[in-house]
Amino acid sequence: MIAYRPSRAPGYAALALLGLALAAGFLPVLRLGAEQGLSGLDPYVFRVLRFTLLQAGLSTILSLALGLPLARALARQSAFPGRALLLRLLNLPLALPAIVVIISIIEVYGAKGWLGGIFDIYGLQGILLAHVFFNVPLAARLILSDLERIPAESWKLAAQLDLPSLAIWRLVEWPAVRSGIAGAALLIFLLCASSFAVVLTLGGGPRATTLEVAIYQSLRSDFDPQRAAMLALVQLALCATLALVAQAWGGLGVSWPALRLQPKRYDGQSAMARLVDGGVVLLALLLLVPPLVALVAAGLFHIMPSALLLRALLTSLALGSASAALAFAVTWPLAALAVRSGAWRKIASIAVLTSWIVPPAALATGWFISLIAYAGLSGLAAFLVIAMNALMSLPFVARVLMPALAQSAEAHDQLCLSLGLSGWSRFRLVELPVMKRAIGLSLIMALILSLGDLTAISLFGTQGFVTLPALIYRQMGSYRFDEAIGTALVLSALVLAFSTLAERWSDQR
Amino acid sequence: MIRLEHVSFRYEEMEMRFDAQFPTASFTAVIGPSGGGKSTLLNLIAGFEVPENGRVLIDETDVTTLPPDQRPVSMIFQDNNVFAHLDLWQNVALGIAPSLRLDATQKARVDAALAEVGLAALAHRKPGEVSGGERQRVAVARALVRDRPVLLLDEPFAALGPALRRDMLDLVKTMSQARHLTTVMVTHQPEDALAAASHTAYLETGRIVALRPTAELFAAKDLPGLRAYLGD
C-alpha cells in the first residue's frame, strides 16, 4: 500500500536541532574528560557516584515497598468511602513541582515543624522521604493500571475455585504486574538518580550529594569545569545505560495512567484482608496528607504580593510557554514520521528521550563550556532555560501526541492521499481541528513541567532572572521560610489549575 | 480507457496478475469472493498500490508511478470518505482545492454539486449530523467537482439499506453516463451489477476470470467458481 508520506524536511530539521543541542553539550565534556583521563576519577567522584546509587536504590525499594501494597489494596477494595478521592490525591505529587513538595516536607518534619524531630531531614533521610513522597503514588498508579487490566473472567474463575489470597497473588496478580514493576522500578531509579531539587535542598553537603547536584556546584559555586566534565561523563554513562535498558524493556511508563472501569473482584473481603489493606491506605495517607495540609495551611497566611513575586510569575509563564512551543515544534514532525514508518519510530523514540539519556546537568556542563565562555551567561540564560525545559518535556509531549496522531493517520491518510491534501493545508484542515485536545494537552503538560523546573533555572539563572521555583529556593536560602511557602502555594495553584484543565481534556478525548 | 498491461502484484502469499481493459464511458462491476483481489485491482488503478511488474494506463498515458492525487481518478471508499470535523460543503470543496481557498466560480461549482446529489439544504451540517447515505452522497458530490474521467467505487454502499442503495446506485449511474466516466465498482451484490453495470468482471484468487456484458456473465454456465460464489 502506498503510504501517506509527510515531508521529511521538518523531521530532519528537528533532528538537526536535537543533534546540535547534544553535540554542544556532549563534545566539550568529552574533550575535557579525555584530557584528564582516568586521573579525573578521584575519590570524590566515586563518593558522589556511590551516594547517587545508594539514595536512588533505597528510594526505589521504599517506593515499591509501599506502592505495591497500596496498588493491591486499591485494586481489591473497590468501594471503600474516599477511594476516588484517594486516587485523585495520588495524582497530586506527580503534578506538584519538586520544590513545593520539599518546602512542605520541611514545614512538617523540619526542626520547627509540626512533627519535627522524627526524621533528620537534612541528609539521606530527608532525601528518601521526599523521593518516597513522589514515587509511592507513581508506583501505585502504574501498578494499579496493570492490575485493572486483568480480565473480569480471571476474577470469576478465582472466585469459583475459591483461591486463597496467596494463590491469587501468585497466579493472577503477579503475572499481570511483573513486567510493570520492573518498568516502574527502572523509571523511579532513573528519576531519583537524576533528581536535582530534592538533593540540592535537603542534601548538598559533600556527604549527601548526587552527580546532578555536584555538577551544578562545580559549575556555579566552585567554577571547576574539569570536575564538572568528569562528573557529567559518569552521570551520562549511568543515565544512558538505564534509559537504554528501560527502552529495550519496552519503554518507560511516562504517561499518566488513565482511570478506567475496573472489573468486579470477589476476593479481599475477609477481615484480615480488609485490615491489611486499611493499614496500607492509612500509611499512605500519613505519608501524603501532612505536607499537603501544611502547604495550604501555612501558605495561605503567607502569600505576600510583591513586585518580585509578580515578575517571577510572569517570567515562569513566559519561559514555560516558549519551551512548550519549542517542545511541540520539535516533537510534531518526528511524531508525524514515526506513526507511519518503523525506522522513524525508532529514531523518534530515542530522540525524544534525549534528556533522559543525557541528563540536563551533564548537557548543561557542555553548553556552559562551549557557549558561555564566548557569550557570557546573561544574554543566553533565557534561551538555555527554554531549550533545556523543552528537552525535558519531549518524552511527555510525544507520549500524548503519538497515539492521537496515529489515530488521525489511520482515519485520514487514504482520503488525504487521494485528494492531494498534505503539508500545511493538511495540518490546518485535518490535524489541528481533529487533535486540538491532544495538542492542547501536550502543550499544557510541557508548560507544567517548565513551571516546576528548578534544574535549568539553577544552572543558568542569574540574579535578575527569577522564576517561581527559583524565588522559592532563594527565599529558603535566606531563611525566609514563611515567604517561601506562600510563593510555593501560588506556584501550586498555578500548576494545579493547568493540570485540572489537562485532566479534563484527557478525559474527554 | 483504463488498461492494465501484464500487471503483477504480490500480497502476502497471493500472486495477482491483471490484464484488462475498461473502455471509456463503460460501467463495470467487479464481483468475486473476499480476498480475491477486488480492492487491490481498484488500488492499483487509483495508485494506492504500485505493481511489481507491468503498466497501468489511463487514456493511453502511463500512470504506473504517479501518486494517487495526480491520477485522473476519483475514488469512493466504503467508509472514511469524509472528514468528520468539516461540514459537508467543506468536504466537497476539498475536491477542488486542498487549501479550501476557493474563488466565486469554484464556490458555485461546490453548491451545484451539492444540489445535484440532493444535499443543498444540508450543506453546513457536519457529517455526524446526517445519515450514512447522505455521507456517501458527499463523496459522490466531491467526485463531481473533481471532474476526473475515471470513477472507482469500493463497496461504497455496503453499509446502506436496500432502498437507499438503489437510490445511490441510480445517482452514480446517471452521473457516470452524463459525464462519460469510466466507472469501476466493487460490489458483493449481484443486483447492484445488474442494475448499473454494462459489464461485470468476476475475480478469483488474483485473476480476472471473466469480463463480459453483465447479463451474459450471470447466465454463464462455464464458470464453476462464479456459480459457487453466487450460491446456485
Image (tube, coloured by chain):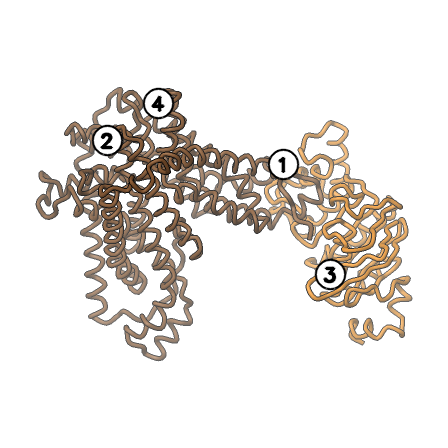
Chain colours: A brown, B orange
For the residue carrying disc 4, how many other residues have a C-alpha within 10 Å: few (<14), some (14-19), or many (20+)?
Answer: some
Q: Is residue A503 visible?
A: no
Q: Position of residue B119 (x, y in %)?
A: 71, 43
For the residue carrying disc 2, how many other residues have a C-alpha within 10 Å: few (<14), some (14-19), or many (20+)?
Answer: many
Residue at the bottom extreme, as displayed: A161
Q: Position of residue A62 (x, y in %)?
A: 23, 55
Residue sitting nearer the eye, B224 or A58: A58
Check whether the beta carbons of the residues at disc 3 and disc 1 lie within 8 A of each other: no
Give me the C-alpha separation between circle 4 and circle 3.
61 Å
Q: Identify the residue position indicated by label 4 in the image.
A: A377
Which quadrant of the structure image shows residue A224? top left
Disc with the residue nearer the chain's start (2 vs 4)? 4
Q: Is residue B12 visible?
A: yes
Disc with the residue nearer the chain's start (1 vs 2)? 1
For the residue carrying disc 1, how many other residues have a C-alpha within 10 Å: few (<14), some (14-19), or many (20+)?
Answer: few
- Residue type highlighted by circle 3: Arg
- Residue type highlighted by circle 4: Leu
Check whether the beta carbons of the residues at disc 3 and disc 2 lie within 8 A of each other: no
Give me the C-alpha separation between circle 1 and circle 2.
44 Å
Q: Identify the residue position indicated by label 2 in the image.
A: A472
Q: Identify the residue position indicated by label 1 in the image.
A: A423
| B37 relative to A97 in the view: left or right | right
- Provide the secondary structure element on which disc 4 rests: helix
Residue sitting nearer the eye, B45 or A230: A230
